[in-house]
Amino acid sequence: PNPKPQTPNPKPQNPNPKSLKNKLLEWVIFKLKNKINYRNIKNRGLKFINMNNLDREQLIYMAKVCEQSERFEDMLGYMKKVLDLGVSLNVGERNLLSVAYKNFVGVPRSAWRVLQSLEEKEKKDVKDRSEEPNRDVRLELLKQCKKDTEVELSNICQEIINSIDNTCLKKAEENKENDAKVFFLKMKGDYYRYIAEYILEEEKADVAQNITDTFAEAKMKEQAIFKRPLC
């Protein structure tokens, strides 16, 4: 008997671009309706643990636990509590503080890049405007969502810079810890760079100067440590 003809596999259907755009619109509206205001990270910590009852060793231990479990807001809360003790941080503790800050600010940075890309795509995609009456609405929602993210980023970055200036660098200066000063100056410069990613062009000159000055000071102190020019 003749074999039965094989039916070709159906081609995978591409998702409906309009349904994708509607989902995007719903997501943006959800984000705007459920905005999470900038949170004070000073007293963050696992709710069932009283941070005030922990000594330095226990705070550092909990920060490491939070790092491994990717609870970076809580990790930062424990590390800021260590700073409140008024003690100098060793190399490992400085790295913990840096990791906590970087991951805490990483979420809104990533969100801003996505929103920026979506906004640029909406601006370029101007065809069939009459068939897309919600296009202008989507663009306005994206702009508002991006603006809110920029405010959150500014608050976080400025708090980090203030913490470095008022606590970390002061303590390093008191104890004449040049390696710590270099570490925190470079860290401060990084957060000025993060600010430069999203601010307006007319505001970038001042931030660029802060970046240049901060890294120049770090390089000068680093050269003083090693007594030789850096390559």
Image (cartoon, rainbow, N blue to C red):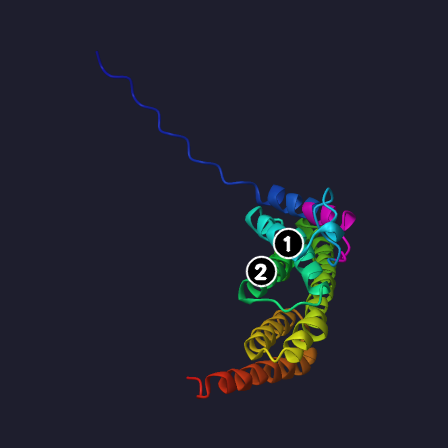
**Magenta run includes residue 108:** no
Circles 1, 2 touching at the beta carbon (< 8 Å):
yes
Q: Position of residue 213 (x, y in %)?
A: 61, 85
Q: Which residue is depicted at the point 59% across and 48% down?
A: 65
Q: Secondary structure at mark 2?
A: helix
Q: Position of residue 142 (x, y in %)?
A: 69, 57
**Magenta run includes residue 31:** yes
* Residue on which disc 1 sits: 75
Confirm whether residue 124 shows in the render.
Answer: no
* Residue on which disc 2 sits: 96
Q: Secondary structure at mark 1?
A: helix
Three-letter amino acid code at disc 2? Leu
Q: Nearer the viewer, residue 181 or 132?
A: 181
Q: Position of residue 116 (x, y in %)?
A: 62, 61
Between the residue at mark 1 and the residue at mark 2, the CA separation in whole angstroms equals: 8 Å
* Label 2 crowd bin: few (<14), some (14–19), many (20+), radius 10 Å: many
Q: Which residue is depicted at the point 67% across and 51% down?
A: 74
Range drawn in magenta: 27-40
Three-letter amino acid code at disc 1? Met
**Vertical placement of residue 84 versus 71, above or below:** below
Number of numbered tags placed on the structure image: 2
